[in-house]
Image (spheres, rainbow, N blue to C red):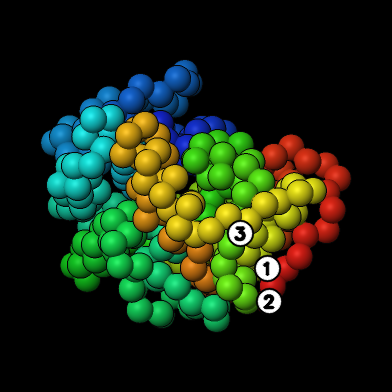
Amino acid sequence: MRVLITGAAGCLGQVLIPRLLADARVSAVIAHDQRPLRLDHQKLRTLVGDIRDPAVGRAARGVDAVVHMAFVVIESGLGRERRNRTLAREINVGGTQALVDALDPKTRLVHLSSASVYGTSREPLTEAAEMKPLPGFRYAEDKVRAEELVMAAAKDGLSALRLRPHIILGSYAQPFLRGALRLPVYARLPPPAPPLQVVHEQDVAAAILAALFSEATGAIHLACEDQMSFEAMQRHLHRHAFAVSPRAAQRAARFAFRYLGIGPDPSWSAGLDCPLVLDSARARAVLGWRPRFPRIADVLNDTFGRTEMRPGPSER
């Protein structure tokens, strides 16, 4: 199989590409990103450029499968353009549209979406749930629109599978997520604490690899088996974790993003403060997905290099 990866230099690409190169079923990997990929392999070819560039479409015509991961996750990565909503949407949505328009219907598409398309829920959601992102959460809004474009292409005959992972952690995970968990601080919210889930980057990569060789279509969730609030995660990682007011946390996030040019859009913190739980039974049934890190404590321990941890509370 010949595979094209968009957003290849991103956090997940650093985990996925070595697995693809090591798989005997994969004969060639074309890695595309606006940043160069620091990896050399006889099966690897790199393309540097914008996801909206016609060169991506031309490369897509010569492969058997595409893993689409190109997306503006953290707007601060755009530098001075970090508050340019139009630019981010052009990359996220326009880039997806250009890609699906260029694909031959015989090409297999694995599209990386996000649990954030749902917004919030305390009860485990199945893939049949309505996509309804938190108001003002631009990342999630663009993920919904990108999925809609992929679904439209699927109706026209494209073999497409949309993966919706929850918060991705691991050695290569987004620095702001790892940084947020390293700080023993959480927003003081009224009980009951909102439950969340995470998933390990290695388990997401394993699901993508399985999806490439599967005929499954539609959407599939990827998340740990259990649930834990952000506060509980902090208490699992730190002997002493401190609560701050949600307003103070939001002000700090806005200041860092606007004046220091660091961190994510402040709307990300709202997502961490809202409950969101997914049912991942379809991933196990359809893809044969068996996470190496099935519980949140497993993911946290590996991400932060802990071998012995105090048992963390879990809210079910």
* Closer to the eye: label 2 or 1: 2
**For residue 31, above or below residue 94:** above
Write down the residue under mark 2. Answer: 316
**Is 307 on the left or on the right of 41, as rendered?**
right
**Pointer 1: residues within 10 angstroms few (<14), some, or many (20+)?**
some
Q: Which amino acid does label 3 sit on?
A: Phe
Residue 103 position, x and y percent, is 21, 50
- Label 2: how many residues lie within 10 Å, few (<14), some (14-19) or many (20+)? few
Can residue 26 be spotted in the picture?
A: no
- Residue at the image position 45 percent from the left and 73 percent from the top: 120
SS category of the residue bearing label 3: helix
Q: Is residue 71 left or right of residue 237?
A: left
Where residue 286 sits: x, y (%)? Answer: 53, 69
Judge depth for marks 2 and 3 and give the one in front. 3
Disc on res. 230? 3
Look at the image and tell me whether residue 234 can be seen.
yes
First in sequence: mark 2 vs mark 3: 3
Position of the C terminus, as image quadrant, is bottom right
Q: Where is residue 256 in the image (x, y as percent from the top left)?
A: 40, 38
Of 51 and 118, nearer the camera is 118
Identified at 75% across, 54% down, the residue is: 236
Q: Quickly name the residue at label 1.
A: 226
Three-letter amino acid code of the residue under disc 1: Asp
Q: Identify the element where label 1 is drawn.
A: loop
Closer to the eye: label 1 or 3:
3
Return the residue nearer the eye: 146 or 18.
146
